[in-house]
Image: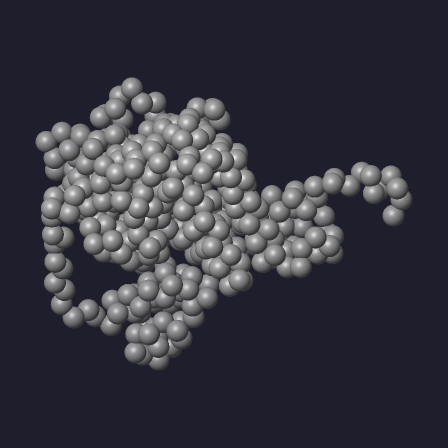
Amino acid sequence: MTDVERSSRPRDRKAQLAAVAAELFRARGFPGVSIKDIADAAGVTGPALYRHFADKQAILAYVVLSGFDDLEEATASALSDSVPTSDQLESLLSRLATQAVERREIAALWRWEGRHLPKEDQREIARRSALALAAWSKALLARRPDLPAEDAELLCWAALSVFGSVSVHHTSVARRRFAQLLVELALDVLNATLPSPSSVPEPPSLRLGTPSRREQVLAEATALFAHRGFHDVSMEDIGAAAGIAGPSVYRHFPSKAALMVAIGHRAADRLALAAERALQAPDERSALQRLAASYVHTILHTPELLVSFSADRVTMPDRDKADLLRVQRDYVAQWVTLLSAVRPSLPAREAKITVHAALTIANDLARTRRVASRPHFEAELTTLLHTVLGVS
């Protein structure tokens, strides 16, 4: 290789290749992207890619961990004092918001593709997340000294989800305003007043009859997909969990993709039913409040809902995928319509960003065992959604 060829090669080639891979992972899901796909998109050969990364997992790890590097740098820079001030907390939020807007793919990969990382990298992410959350909680407690420590942690998790929400949609506004809006929403969360235990109603009890064999298969598939991911579960695994031979599963569902389609439609049906009841309200504000409460209740009691969020990363017929995507968009549109009616001064794009922030808080915290085990979590989560939407 000549000196000219060496000098023409970008110094940050590794980061550039990782950025190309990150966009592909976000669009198709980690299992749906090959090394060849990444090399082709980057305009390099496979061997050239392997000079920088040992395998596809190494690329994913590089992208996700570099995102944590940025997060830690922002945290250390903003919260430099032993007792952080309110100004420092807001400086941190501003930095995190800017990073979220400029690198939307990082949050998506961390939230949905982290399970594909080696166990040691997963443990490293968990460790670094805990340290960051501890620093943020300390800063929040300096701002709100009467807040219980466990409540501060819950609010910090929710604020993190506000920034992560940019990964689930493509709506955008001017970068500066986008970051400012995220800061405003995060501050609303951090300043939220959680309901006292005495004001929390008892959740309704659900009494169900004996499910059919098809329902048993669907329930077991849902649990396995939630725990291990779609691609790491076989039809034999599902049959064993349901107490039948693997081939017998095909009597009910012709493929894993068909199972995922059924899960997606089941989740959509339950959301639609809950929304129909919620919308029977005297005004738009009450309807939006009820809609948020119905979503929280449904997501906490309907495992299909969390699993269905990964349906766009599953290989299934285009018609089914498009149909599920349309249903999801129509559901979000209901929220946006109500929010725009309640807050007419809020621009349409900002209303949509706000709705996605609220939904992402529910989706993320429902999957975060550390906070989801709180005794009054459903009421607290509903309060957080009302706060973000501005209808508390």
Res 388 seen here: no
**Relative to the observer, which residue lies in front, 101 or 217?**
101
- Residue 179, relative to residue 28: is it above or below? above
Name the residue located 73 percent from the left edge and 54 percent from the top edge: 51
Q: Which residue lies furthest to the bottom in this view?
A: 245
Position of the C terminus, as image quadrant, is top left
Q: Which residue lies furthest to the top in this view?
A: 345
Q: Which residue lies furthest to the front in this view?
A: 82
- Residue 213, relative to residue 125: is it above or below? below
Way the structure is coloured: one colour
Name the residue located 37 percent from the left edge and 42 percent from the top edge: 137
Name the residue located 47 percent from the left edge and 24 percent from the top edge: 176
Q: Is residue 386 left or right of residue 258?
A: left
Name the residue located 82 percent from the left edge and 39 percent from the top edge: 7
Residue 119 percent coordinates (x, y): 51, 63
Residue 371 percent coordinates (x, y): 30, 52
Q: Is residue 315 left or right of residue 241?
A: right
Res 8 seen here: yes
